[in-house]
Image (cartoon, coloured by chain):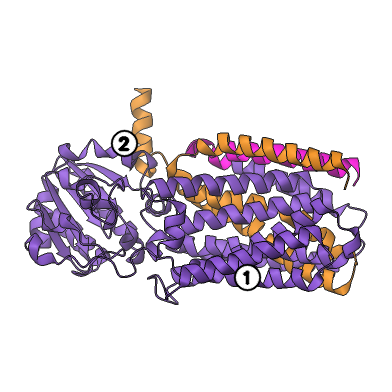
Amino acid sequence: MSTEVIIAGLYVFALAAFLGYQVISRVPPLLHTPLMSATNAISGISLVGSLVTAGANYSTLSTVLGFIAVTASTINVVGGFMITDRMLRMFKRQPGPKKDSTEEQKRA
Amino acid sequence: MGLPIELTYLAASILFILGLKGLSHPESARRGMIFAEIGMLLAIVGTLLHREIVSYEWIIAGLIIGSLIGGAMSIWVPMTAMPQRTALSHAFGALAASLVGVSEYYRHGAGELGTFKMTALSLEVLLGGITVTGSLMAFIKLQDWIRGTPITYRGQNVFNMTLLALTVGMFVYLIFDPSAHALFYAMAGLAFVFGVLLVLPIGAADMPVVMSLMNSYAGLAAAATGFAISNNVLIIAGTLDGFSGFILSILMCRAMNRSITNVLFGAFGAETATAESGTLGAMREVKAEDMAVQLAYAGQVVFVPGYGMATAQAQHAVRELANILEARGVTVKYAIHPVAGRMPGHMNVLLAEANVPYSSLYDLEQINGEFPATDVAVVIGANDVVNPDARDNPKSPIAGMPILNVDRARSVVVLKRGKGKGFAGIENPLFFKPNCGMLYGDAKTSLIKLAGEVQNA
């Protein structure tokens, strides 16, 4: 690996760390559980590494390990996003009937 | 790698960040997640065009099986089991990272591996291994397959530290001599063992910290994978995940006034608290009927849920009671301690599931000033987070932990299964205060009964 590639990678890491700190500090405690499942789903991006390992025919061992890795990360990606959405759908400002009444009040 | 693939990765990175930014507010959160999902799809499709990929059958099989398992889990897992599901997904994520790491090491002869790549690979396998077994241990504890109390033995910390030092020693050696194959696999094996040993002495009440820490490790393992295979989107996503877990760990520790080291090596709640209740007076038991009258004529009621609400699956019953109270003109609020439950934000999700609007959910800082103006504080299966000793008694094992000041409410009712102590095994003087009544029994049954009584009041 050339020095430039390494340094570029470290730049990306450092900047992502600062950005992540800024963005994630602003997530309210209310959403900490969805945050955890969302970051989990996102880090399932390691799937892209597993895909190459599973599909490149390097060796049988690599293919088998890659296959397990693809399965494991897909569980995280699909399951993570689905359950995050399931949770976020539950967070409502006002539940069902009350919403109508406040909207009516606003209109009035 | 071709330019088109790199461009999909760039787009994915931006979309991921936008997605997390959306989580700063419940209104924008779902839209944000859609951005992140599009980003993920782009990155996956982009990768499938990679020229090194020649056969697709294993990939397709893995994608299908993974989608089925992941989809099924996310549809059927109950909200009360979110901590277990999250622990499992940390294990899966870390497993993927460590397997890619092992495979990369196996593929490249030792000669090809430069110092930097070897460092990244070893780090990936090390963090990945610890996270896989550590998270599985957390899962087993959360699932109650083994008891939640810390499991300790003599010389545990010394043993663990020695093992860790040994593993780190191998890690350092491998950086200078990547050709030591046996050592690499031994290090991977030790990482798996260390994960188990790390979580073994940690009590169930400290799970929010463990979960956050595992979250962080899983992310950093993914970032290390990114370095090992020179893939920027992996570095970015892994770093975001790693830092998110890190921030949560700090927040959770702060909410308990303890350091990470203390959580990991303190074996909290193992055999503490010998203070006898005799000196504190007697607990006053209240009847549901009497409590119902109190609630029915209250101006403001604050519910304080803890893990007991989750185990009793009582969130819907809480909401039912709150509905009846609100219909009578009582102001109802919910006070959420950051470490209530077994993972960060656990209580919020449960109450949201029961249709509690998020505008009624209050953080520690927001609600503490309101307790003096509260007629009844209803503590549901929470204990240590409302223990006034943490605030008043510097000798208490939980001294300095920020608590919900329920004892300052005009009256307090504690819904509790039995007369036992909390998870940390610490006596709670709140239960002996004159303004505090105890309502024993299953939280859900008690709440349903209360709702019925309030309706008749």
Across and down, in percent, residue B137 comes to 52, 70
Q: Please give the count of numbered marks on the rendered protein.
A: 2
Asked if residue A57 is among those painted magenta in the image, a careful observer would answer: no
- Which chain is purple in the rendering? B
Which residue is at 83% across, 39% downward? B7
Q: Are marks 2 and 1 on the same chain?
A: yes
User: Residue at image x 22%, y 37%?
Assistant: B370
Image location of residue B237, percent across then percent down: 68, 46
Circle 1 packing at 10 Å, graded few (<14), some (14-19), many (20+), is many
Could you say which is closer to the camera, residue B31 or residue B50? B50
Magenta stretch: dominant SS? Answer: helix
Tag 1: residue type?
A: Phe
Magenta span: B1-30
Q: Is residue A23 above or below residue B214?
A: above
Going by the numbered disc 2, the residue's amino acid type is Gln
The residue positioned farthest toward the top in the image shown: A108
